[in-house]
Amino acid sequence: MKPIQVGLLGIGTVGSGTFNVLKRNQQEIQGRAGRGIEITMVADLDVARAQSVVGPDVKVVNDARAVIANPEIDIVIELIGGYGIAKALVLEAIAAGKHVVTANKALLAVHGTEIFAAASAKGVMVAFEAAVAGGIPIIKALREGLTANRIQWIAGIINGTTNFILSEMRDKGLDFDVVLKEAQRLGYAEADPTFDIEGVDAAHKVTLMSAIAFGIPVQFDKAYVEGITKLGAADIKYAEQLGYRIKLLGITKRTAAGIELRVHPTLVPAKRLIANVEGAMNAVMAHGDAVGTTLYYGKGAGSEPTASAVIADLVDITRLHTADAAQRVPHLAFQPDAISNTPVLAMSEVVTSYYLRLRVADEAGVLAKVTGLLAEAGISIDAVLQREADEISGEAATQTDVIILTHDCAEAKMNAALAQMQALPTVLQPITRIRKEELA
Ligand code: NDP
Ligand code: HSE
C-alpha cells in the first residue's frame, strides 16, 4: 500500500526530531502502523535550513498553505506554535479534510472547543499527545487506559523548564537567570519563556488534562495561574527542613462543588516519588476510583522525546483514518453529548493547606498574635518553625523568620487571615504563602 503522506509545518526543535525519528525507525513504525508513513512536504520560514535537515528528496516551501493545498497530503503536522498563524493553518487544514497532529498546547487550551468542533464536523482527527508532558503518553493513558475510572484528581510536574530551574537552583545554588538561559539553549523553553516561568504553559497542559479527565470543555480562562518567579531560595531551604520539596504543579480535582484547575508552586512531601522528579523531567499523578493512584514519568520536552509523541499520533491516525468517525476515540475522551457543564471553581473556593513565611520583629508575643489570628479565623496549624536571626544572612539580629504549616482551609479564609496578619506592625515584609499538597 502507498505510504500515508504527511506535510510538516515548522521544522524547528520538535519538527526536526519528528523527521529524524520517523526516518530512523521507519521499518518498526511501519510494522506497527500497517502502512508506511512519510513526510513528503515541509514548510518553514527558513527554507535553506529546513532543506538541510530533510535532504533533497523532500519538497520544502516557505508557504504553509501550499502544504495544506497539496491533495496528496493526508495528515498535516503543525509544529509552529502559538495562537496566531498556527490557529489559521490548523483550521484551514481541517477545512481541507486533513487530519491534524499538533504539539501546540497553547492553541488547544485556548481555542480547543472551536478546533475540535470543526474537526468533528469535518470527520477528521486532531491528535495532540505531544501537547502535554512531551514524551509521556499521558493523553493516551487518561483518555483510554483509565477509561473505566471516575478520575478524582491529577497533579503533575508538566513544565520541564521550571522543574529544571527549581532543581538547578536547589542542587547547585545557581541563579534563576543562568538556569533559564541553559533551558533555552537545550530547547526546553517556549519561544516566549515567560509562558514557562509564569506557569502559563503548565496551565495550558493541565487545562487539557482536566477536560479529558472530567468531561468538561477546555477552559484555560478559568485556570488559576501562578509561576515560580517570586520563589525565594529561603523558602526552598525551609521547605526542605520541614520535609518538603517545592515543585510547580498543575492540579485539577473533582470536588462536590466543582472542578479545581490551578497551577502554582506547591510544597510536596519529600518522600513522594513526584517530589524527586528532577531536571527537565515531567511526572503526572492521576487518581482514579478503581485504579487508585498512578504515576507517569519521563521527558516532558526536547526534540526527540516530543517527536516520540507526535509519531505515536501519526500511527494512531494511520490505523484509524479509514474507520467510521463515530468509532474513533473522542478528542476529549467523552462523546460530545456527554460533555458536562460542571463549573470550574474560583481560586477563592479551593480548599488546600499552606506554608506561610513571615519576617517578623523578634519580640515577645509576636508569634502569639500571628497564631491567634489564625485561630480566630478557624485555621488549624500543623507545624511552626522559627529561624534565629543569625540564620538570616545580612539581616539585623532583631528580625526572625516564622514558618507556619497549616491544615486544609478555604483559600478565601486564608486570604482574609493573611490580610490581618500583614497589617500587624511586627510583620515586617510581605508574607510568603505557598500552597501545600500531601498527594496521599
Ligand atoms: P521552534 O521555534 O523550534 O520551531 C518552530 C518552527 O516553525 C521554526 O523552524 C520556525 O521557523 C517555523 N515557523 C514559524 N512560523 C512559520 C510559518 N508561518 N510557516 C512555516 N514555519 C514557520 O519550536 P518548537 O519545535 O520548540 O515547538 C513547536 C511546537 O511544539 C510549539 O507549539 C511548542 O509549544 C510545542 N512543544 C515543544 C516542545 C519542546 O520541547 N520544544 C515540547 C512539547 C511541545 P523560524 O525559526 O525560521 O522562525
Ligand atoms: N516549554 C515546555 C517545557 C516544553 O519546558 O516543558 C514542553 O511542553
Image (cartoon, helix red, strand yellow):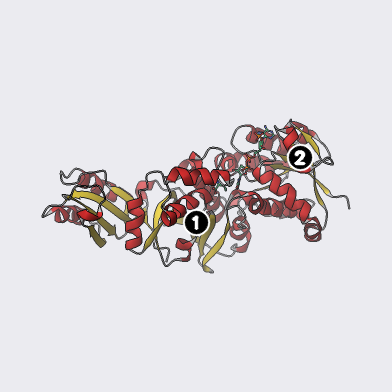
Q: Residue at x 70, y 52 (%)?
A: 313
Q: Position of 19 compared to 167: left or right?
A: right
Viewer-nearest residue: 234 or 4: 234
Q: Residue furthest left?
A: 364
Q: Residue furthest right?
A: 1
Where 73 sits versus 280, above or below?
Answer: above
Viewer-nearest residue: 304 or 78: 304
In the rendered image, which residue does mark 1 sit on?
A: 156
Amino acid, disc 2: Ser
Amino acid, disc 1: Gly
User: In the picture, residue 9 is in which quadrant?
Assistant: top right
In the rendered image, which residue does mark 2 sit on?
A: 52
Q: Residue at x 63, y 50 (%)?
A: 130
The percent coordinates of residue 186 (x first, y second) are 58, 47
Where 113 sits versus 160, above or below?
Answer: above
Q: How far, Cα to Cα, is label 1 from label 2?
A: 37 Å
Q: Residue at x 50, y 55 (%)?
A: 157
The percent coordinates of residue 150 (x first, y second) are 52, 62
* Residue 323 visible in image: no
* Residue 347 visible in image: yes
Depth-wise, is mark 1 or mark 2 nearer the camera? 2
Mark 1 / mark 2, whichever is N-terminal? 2
Q: Label 2: how many residues lie within 10 Å, few (<14), some (14-19) or many (20+)?
A: few
Q: Is mark 2 within 8 Å of ligand 1?
A: no
The percent coordinates of residue 386 (x first, y second) are 22, 58
Q: Label 1: how many residues lie within 10 Å, few (<14), some (14-19) or many (20+)?
A: many
Q: Of helix, strand and loop, which one carries label 1?
A: strand
Disc 1 and disc 2 in contact, CB within 8 angstroms? no
